[in-house]
Amino acid sequence: MNLKELYLGGNEIKSLGSLVQEKEGMKLNKLEVLSLSHNLINNTIFSSLAELSNLKSLDLSDNELEGAIYTKDLNALSNLEELILFENEVNGFIPSQGLRLLNLKVLHLSVNHLSNSVMSSLATLSNLKTLWIDISKFNGLIDMEGLYGFSNLEELYMFCINLFADADADCSFSLQSLGLFPTLKTLYLFGFNINETTMASYPHNNLYGLRNLEELYMICNTDCSFSLQTLGLFPTLKTLSLQGFNINKTSMASYSHNSKF
């Protein structure tokens, strides 16, 4: 009854059965950490976890979750701080703006079947600090406006990956949109088309989210440009990694001193 952490990864489990049912099974009311990674669990798991009201960390990576997840069942875990759904076949949440996990700080959604529409579903997670997310069914500019509520976000890991043989994931991203995240410290972008050669001309208030950036990792898909002048917009930057970019520094001598890094 005093158990706080339970790890059941890699056991071919399909369901918890009566394990967590208050009347029939163990009363795990004090459980805070539950790891069920690398099993055979499907979407019904969320309704069966409703009794675990003190749960803070839930790992369901590499299972058989698929389609949309009903937010009503998920919201029952109101104290959840970390949710890991890595490597499943999740494509969204129903209703799209129904997530009410106000204590959630870490969300890992990479290697799923998500499109850009998932952004609006995440907008209510106002205390989120770390987000891992793939966009695998989308073409065009990623609309970050759906994440307007992420005022506390510190780490953002975004991937544009084609997981389907008949699909073409061609994503574009503008660093200007990061003005939405004033506390951002780490940014990792993989597989996007990025062109920021004129970024230094953007209004300062549109780039406020970059002023605290300490780590910037960008791996380009195709046709990406980056100007060294832009580095002047990252006064706290400690780590920079650019792969696959055309670097433009030809006119750098004409830039004002405070624009240089």
Image (cartoon, grey):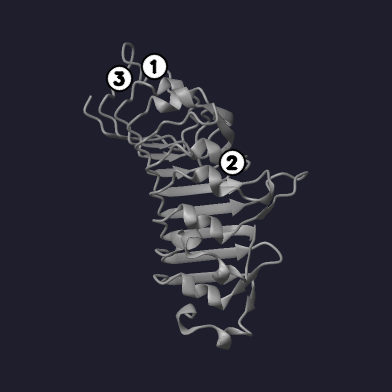
Residue marked by disc 2:
112
Mark with earlier residue (2, 1): 1
Q: Please tell me whether mark 1 sits on a helix, a strand or a loop.
A: loop
Q: Amino acid at mark 2?
A: Asn
Q: Residue at x 60, y 48 (%)?
A: 143
Q: Position of residue 12 (x, y in %)?
A: 50, 31
Closer to the camera: disc 2 or disc 3?
A: 2
Q: Residue furthest right?
A: 166
Q: Residue at x 61, y 57 (%)?
A: 173
Q: Position of residue 31 (x, y in %)?
A: 29, 30
Q: Position of residue 112 (x, y in %)?
A: 59, 41
Return the mark for residue 183. Answer: none
Nearest the viewer among 12 and 119 is 119
Examine the rendering and report whether any part of residue 15 can be seen. Answer: no
Q: Amino acid at mark 1?
A: Ser
Q: Position of residue 228 (x, y in %)?
A: 56, 77
How many marks do you count on the picture?
3
Nearest the viewer among 86 and 7 is 86
In this view, 26 is above or below 140 = above
Return the mark for residue 18. Answer: 1
Q: Residue furthest top?
A: 23
Q: Amino acid at mark 3?
A: Met
Q: Residue at x 53, y 26 (%)?
A: 43
Nearest the viewer among 151 and 1 is 151
Distance, label 2 to label 1, CA atoms, is 29 Å
Examine the rendering and report whether any part of residue 89 can be seen. Answer: yes
* Left or right: where 137 falls relative to 212: right
Distance, label 2 to label 3, CA atoms, is 32 Å
Residue marked by disc 3:
26
